[in-house]
Image (cartoon, rainbow, N blue to C red):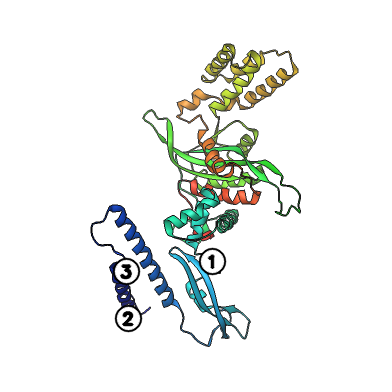
């Protein structure tokens, strides 16, 4: 655009804005709501008009023949094509001259190349909005939201399709280790390690969400079959320290979540931890519920980590023994649990084990309970030295990851009546994990 073009454009916009003010600006006293409404309306009209004029300025000079962008051969004009594109300021119908190379057969529209259009019916920012809000709430709520906030008109099916496409692109980028480093940068780049941190926490847990088998609406693949699949959730976070030197609160957090088995979850969790400094942290602490898959993952990939069984889960297992031995809800059961906690609070897990072992149940069912729970405490006794953990200021509760399970999975994937194709759930989870982290990922490169 030349200097003269810019001057003419500004003069034209000023004339048009003056006419708009003359036509739309009410006379007399105005309330704040009336001012707000008229300013919003005038702003949208002027923004839309400016976008139209700038697009026109980018339109190449018509010609019967242009150079092919692939082979530089002669590409004669063939016909006019229209394309509807939804931008931040509304729908735009673009009239583009279509050319086809006589040498290599490549067809193209010069305006598409000038505007860097990718053949989609919405700009990257509009698609990013759809993916963001489509992952945060039901797809059906997004069209009304974007209409109210931006005046954009689109359908629920468009939001759903766009969200799943963006989520799939994000999953593909994760598989190759590519992330976006800055919100303003639209080019994925290789992941870089974070600098070392003082103390880093890792937490992992599982939560179920409703899935369905592949089917067609015409019923040709049989009846709809629903099932529940486990979603594994992992997080990395760093805490603050209080005056007593105990860890509390959260400075920052980052998530990952997947419906894949442990073989698929493990590399995601390892990559998440490494990207946030696990290899350089002075201390690494892993909190979990004592599940075998968490123990195995940590021993293999984070061998220097301090492993802690969540205190609440430990207490649940004590109550399982006490209720079976003394009866559920009895004073004897509560007293037995309290006494067992006293020993665990003082780094005496062997004594707690002995208290379970001294029980001599008569029924085979109770014997199975005792043996199972004894095995749980035996395998995790080194992870139940709560006096030592508290002296170091460590957190001993895994409430963070349990909240993450609700935020990432339950609140979006397990609403009333929902059931998901596994690939669709994975796509939504990928976006939610990135957006719920302290430093949200820019979605535009994946749109």
Most foreground residue, 89 or 207: 89
The answer to whether residue 5 is above or below residue 127 is below
Q: Is residue 443 at least partly visible in the picture? A: no
Most foreground residue, 206 or 222: 222
Percent position (x, y) of residue 368? 72, 21
Residue lying at the far front in this picture: please name it.
Answer: 28
Mark 1, other Cα within 10 Å: few <14 / some 14–19 / many ≥20: some
The answer to whether residue 313 is above or below residue 41 is above
Residue 248 relative to residue 163: left or right: left
The tag earlier along the polypeptide, 1 or 2, is 2
The tag earlier along the polypeptide, 3 or 2, is 2
Q: Is residue 390 at least partly visible in the picture? A: yes
**Helix, strand or loop for disc 3:** helix
Label 3 to label 2, Cα distance in Å? 24 Å
Mark 2, other Cα within 10 Å: few <14 / some 14–19 / many ≥20: few
Residue 68 relative to residue 3: left or right: right
Residue 199 relative to residue 2: left or right: right
Corner quadrant of residue 226: top right
* Label ID, residue 390: none
Q: Residue at 43% x, 35% y: name it.
A: 249
Q: Residue at 38% x, 31% y: name it.
A: 242
Percent position (x, y) of residue 48? 40, 67
The answer to whether residue 281 is above or below residue 166 is above
Are dots 3 and 2 in contact, CB under 8 Å?
Answer: no
Q: Which residue is mark 3?
A: 20
Q: Which residue is mark 2?
A: 4
Q: Residue at 46% x, 25% y: name it.
A: 391
Q: Which residue is mark 1?
A: 121
């Amino acid at each position: 655009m030349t200097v003269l073009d810019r001057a003419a454009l500004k003069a034209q916009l000023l004339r048009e804005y003056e006419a708009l003010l003359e036509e739309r600006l009410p006379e007399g006293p105005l309330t704040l709501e009336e001012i707000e409404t008229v300013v919003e309306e005038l702003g949208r009209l002027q923004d839309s008009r400016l976008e139209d004029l700038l697009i026109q300025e980018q339109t190449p000079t018509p010609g019967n023949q242009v150079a092919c962008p692939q082979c530089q051969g002669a590409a004669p004009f063939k016909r006019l094509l229209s394309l509807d594109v939804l931008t931040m300021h509304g729908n735009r119908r673009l009239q583009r001259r279509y050319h086809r190379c006589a040498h290599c057969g490549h067809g193209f529209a010069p305006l598409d190349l000038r505007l860097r259009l990718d053949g989609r019916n919405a700009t990257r920012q509009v698609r990013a909005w759809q993916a963001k809000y489509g992952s945060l709430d039901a797809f059906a709520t997004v069209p009304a939201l974007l209409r109210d906030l931006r005046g954009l008109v689109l359908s629920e099916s468009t939001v759903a399709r766009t969200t799943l496409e963006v989520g799939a692109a994000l999953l593909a980028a994760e598989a190759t280790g590519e992330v976006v480093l800055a919100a303003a940068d639209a080019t994925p780049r290789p992941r870089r390690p974070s600098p070392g941190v003082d103390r880093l926490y890792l937490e992992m847990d599982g939560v179920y969400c409703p899935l369905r088998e592949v089917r067609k609406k015409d019923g040709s693949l049989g009846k709809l079959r629903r099932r529940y699949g486990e979603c594994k959730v992992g997080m990395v976070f760093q805490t603050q320290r209080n005056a007593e030197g105990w860890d509390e609160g959260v400075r920052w957090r980052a998530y990952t979540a997947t419906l894949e088995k442990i073989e698929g979850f493990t590399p995601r969790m390892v990559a998440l931890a490494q990207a946030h400094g696990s290899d350089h942290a002075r201390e690494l602490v892993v909190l979990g519920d004592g599940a075998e898959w968490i123990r195995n993952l940590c021993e293999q990939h984070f061998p220097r980590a301090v492993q802690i069984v969540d205190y609440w889960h430990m207490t649940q297992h004590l109550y399982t023994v006490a209720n079976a031995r003394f009866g559920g809800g009895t004073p004897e059961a509560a007293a037995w649990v309290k006494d067992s906690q006293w020993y665990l609070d003082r780094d005496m897990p062997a004594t707690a084990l002995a208290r379970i072992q001294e029980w001599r149940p008569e029924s085979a069912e109770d014997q199975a309970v005792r043996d199972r729970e004894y095995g749980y405490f035996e395998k995790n006794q080194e992870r139940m030295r709560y006096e030592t953990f508290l002296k170091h200021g460590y957190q001993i509760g895994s409430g963070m990851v349990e909240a993450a399970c609700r935020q990432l999975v339950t609140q979006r994937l397990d609403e009333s009546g929902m059931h998901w194709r596994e690939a669709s759930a994975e796509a939504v989870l990928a976006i939610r994990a990135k957006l719920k982290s302290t430093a949200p990922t820019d979605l535009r490169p994946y749109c």
